[in-house]
Amino acid sequence: MNMSVGSERVQIRVTVNGQVHQREVEARQLLVDLLRETLGLTGTHIGCDTSYCGACTVLLNGEPVKSCTLFAFQAHEADVKTVEGLSHNGDMHPLQKAFVQCHGLQCGYCTPGFLMSSYALLSKNKRPTDDQIRKALAGNTCRCTGYQNIFKAVRSAADTLAAGTQ
Amino acid sequence: MSKKETFVGESKTAGKWVGRPLPRLEDARLVQGQGVFADDYKLEGMLYLQLERSPYAHARITRVDVSKAAAAPGVVCTLTGAELPSISHPFPEIGPGAGQKVEDYALAINKVRYQGEPVAAVVAESRHAAEDAAELVEVDYDPLPVVMTPEDALQSDSLLHDEAGTNRMWHDVFEFGEVDKAFQEALHIVHIGRLHFHRFSSTPLENNVVVGQWNIKEKRIQYFSNQQFPAFAAQFLSPALGVRIDQIGMRSIDIGGGFGIKITSYPYMALCALASRKTGGRPVKWTETRTEHMLASAHGNERTFYDTRVALDANGVITAIESRHIDDCGAYPRYEPLGCIIWAQVLPGVNRLKNIRIDFSQVVTNKCPVGPNRGYSRMQHLWFLERVLDICGHALGIPGDVMRLRNYILPEQFPYTTPNGCVYDSGNYPKMLEVAKELVGWDEWKKKQKEAAAEGRMIGLGIGTTLDSGTNNFGQARIVNAYAPYSGQSKAANIKLDIYGELVLSMGSVPQGQGHETTAAQVVADVLGINPEHLNVRPGFDTEQNVYTGHTGTYASQFAVTGLSAIHGAALKLRAEMSRLAAFALKAQEEELEFGVGAQGPQVSVKNTDKAINYWRLANLVNLNNAELPQSFEDITLNCRYVYKAPFEVPDVKRKYGNLTLTYAAQLHAAVLEVNSETFQPKILAYACVDDCGRAINPLIVEGQVHGGTAHGIGGALMEDCRYDSEGNMLTSTFSDYTPITPMNMPDLRYGHVESPSPFSYNGAKGMGEGGGAPLHALSAALQDALYPRGIVVTDSHNTGDSIFQLFERARQGTEAPVVRVERPRGPR
């Protein structure tokens, strides 16, 4: 690791949506800024700066994290997945389709974060209960939908994914 | 999560697409991270603006020194308040009298008036450089006494705006009917002490963002931002920046929620332009942080209701109300004092009330300026009326549902003219009540409530009936200021058939999640007999490419009426042109033609033949291959603009009388709530919401809007509060303190829909996006129902475990005068 404590700039290597990036970044650069400003992946958003709202949620080695409260260097040698990495060969992920079908979004600003938290949930738990869905999304805030259709979308995607694996 | 849905009334799905729950066309880009929000927008050579803000709520500025900041690495320029009078003008003020004396610049000059007010700006090559340099700005303050309550505002010697000579920015008395006579004849008179509607904000998840560029060579200011009412902002920016309005260009694509809070971002827009000019024309971006948003964007209006007297007859029908209301607009009026008239759109609420006298004032205080937050000004007044109804019901022993049925405007009374001349288009409140009670399980909960009470538990049932008055008549501004240059309401749309046969619609709206692209496509698809995906709807707003009027923006619950009327009108114009052309090309009569979709896509054909012409060929005849076309077709452009103008008149300013809004959507919510007897924490046990927005263009979107408005109301009622301490320090300046409602706090909603088509819109629809704050009414009512047996009157719109505990403590100490007093005069004469 090319990182020495106290240096202003650090070298990092991070895999984002399957692509390896090597960059020199300011030590204070946030992961969300690396994604948005340096790599141009603007699907990840910033809503509160204090890890309450989860608009910045991405997966770090498969775990949902708030990229506004992680430094970019903390993703060194890690695997990051963002909303841009959900579609496969131009085909939307069942979660994305379910959010559209169930009207699980309005302004769409929080949606990438909800999708990533939901993706992490369904990766581990194929058949989440309603309570488990709420808890998995507890760190995400939506100001438009009142959450009802988001819960519905996650249930619907779980059904689709379960049907596909049978 | 069981969810029950119900539908009552006639479904007027006249079209093939209008009326269908079509999934939204805008969603594909948004779920794939391909939306374009303002902070995603970058320009070559873009600079970043960082603000230095006041830590004091009220202080004189004695020194501002930006020299160290200006010398910091990467800094291109700075701006201070002292410079502003030489490079800009104060923003226009809407209010008369004292309001006209307020000087509102984009930065504080001699004093600061709320915590977080911008004092200086630093512009640098990177966001980090701007942030670092802003920390080097030195400001000295001399603190002044703060004004934090309406009482302070009226009594204190401390003035926010010395030049205005008073903290009271507006005052007038609204009197309708025969109030004194009604009190003389009343069987019961109920006196109610101070009631308070708290300050909260729908806090869009995307903060304010502005990219502004003052292009010196082209003499133009170009904005890319998330401003939701650009026509209004331009009318403030043009005089402040000293440019013609056509020199200001505005664009937005996706906006991450607005709820009215993004209407008053124009001071920040001015700053970006001034900073850009100072740098020689480089683009300047300002991205608000959440804490900046909480401190200094806009909050909803706070209102206090004093000395209320209510006259009632023997049946609990309210015959008169008299009261004194003071609205607190924070440090600068900005969109105000429009809120001082907008509540009067719903003067009697949903009730037949005829006699009303309200003494209404608006004051400035050392808090963040307000903005028109979802449910703006009507929600506060409707909450007051619902409180009056419930308190009187409890005082007289009449249940809340019965009180409502006795006071509601009856279905057969529509269109109903209110005492101040507003015309409610349609509605059926008793039916909505019946549906809501059924959905929430009212009768069973009544039984459970009794059983629980025997065990010492506190369960309450409450109803909130509210109005979402939509399509406002700007003429009401003349009632607050007779010289205000506004009236009516309009929206524009443009649809064209382009060279290769592409249909392109540009809307004069500024959507922030309301699904305009989808409902617009549904309307056009029905007019032209095509599928919604055949239409290309330009996302967002663009002064260069879109059409607009002075009312352009998305606010005041109106797109289904004004926006779609404009789009419908433009589509009909285009259809008429296409019909003439097709008749010529196909050598047929127009009456023989049919609009539809053929093997080659959208086309116009001759009925019962195989003769058809596709859109490419039609467009080609006008645009590229036009020597074929005779002179008589030269008026055809296939580029059709239509402006919808709502049928309004200027109100009678002296009498404060006239139709202030075109449509009146209603929502009725029923809530069951329990107060924990140990923690006093309120918990929702069951919740139902019923809406009536006339004909639903897209029921999926309508239900989504109801859910969203309900979440804002529940959050506002039980969690969210813009709280200040006595020195004017904001205590809820992060989301962790403000606690917007989360998936863990949101109850399951049972949803019902009643449909009373509006006779005043072409499509029977009513605007419905604001929702009217029904949860605030329903939850206050449920809480009141739970606590009245304990001798407690709910006086605030915001109630938490802590505040309910305080209510119990005050009741236990018994030191305060009772909030409610019932006076029984001799009886009816």
Image: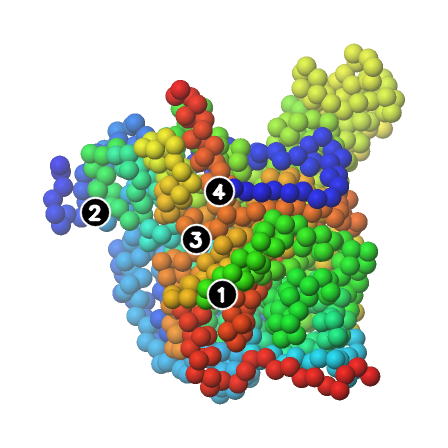
Instruction: State how far apart marks 3 and 2 are (Cα).
Output: 37 Å
Marks 4 and 1 sit apart, C-alpha to C-alpha, by 29 Å
User: Taking B52 as reference, is B261 left or right?
Assistant: right
Q: Which residue is mark 3?
A: B745
Choose mark 2 or mark 4, whichever is in front.
4
Residue receiving disc 1? B454
Question: Is label 3 or label 2 in front?
Answer: 3
For mark 2, does the 10 Å Cα neighbourhood hold few (<14), some (14 to 19), or many (20 or more) residues? some
Residue located 42% across and 71% down the image: B805
**Residue type marked 3:** Asn
Q: Residues within 10 Å of mark 1 (few under 14, many from 20)?
A: few
Q: CA distance from mark 2 to mark 1?
A: 63 Å
Q: Secondary structure beneath disc 1?
A: helix
Marks 3 & 2 on one chain: no
Mark 2 and mark 4 in contact? Answer it, CB < 8 Å. Answer: no
- Residue at image coords 77%, 44%: B762
Please identify the residue farthest to the top as the structure is shown.
B610
Q: Nearer the viewer, mark 2 or mark 1?
A: 1
Which disc is residue A27 wearing? 2
Q: Amino acid at mark 4?
A: Met
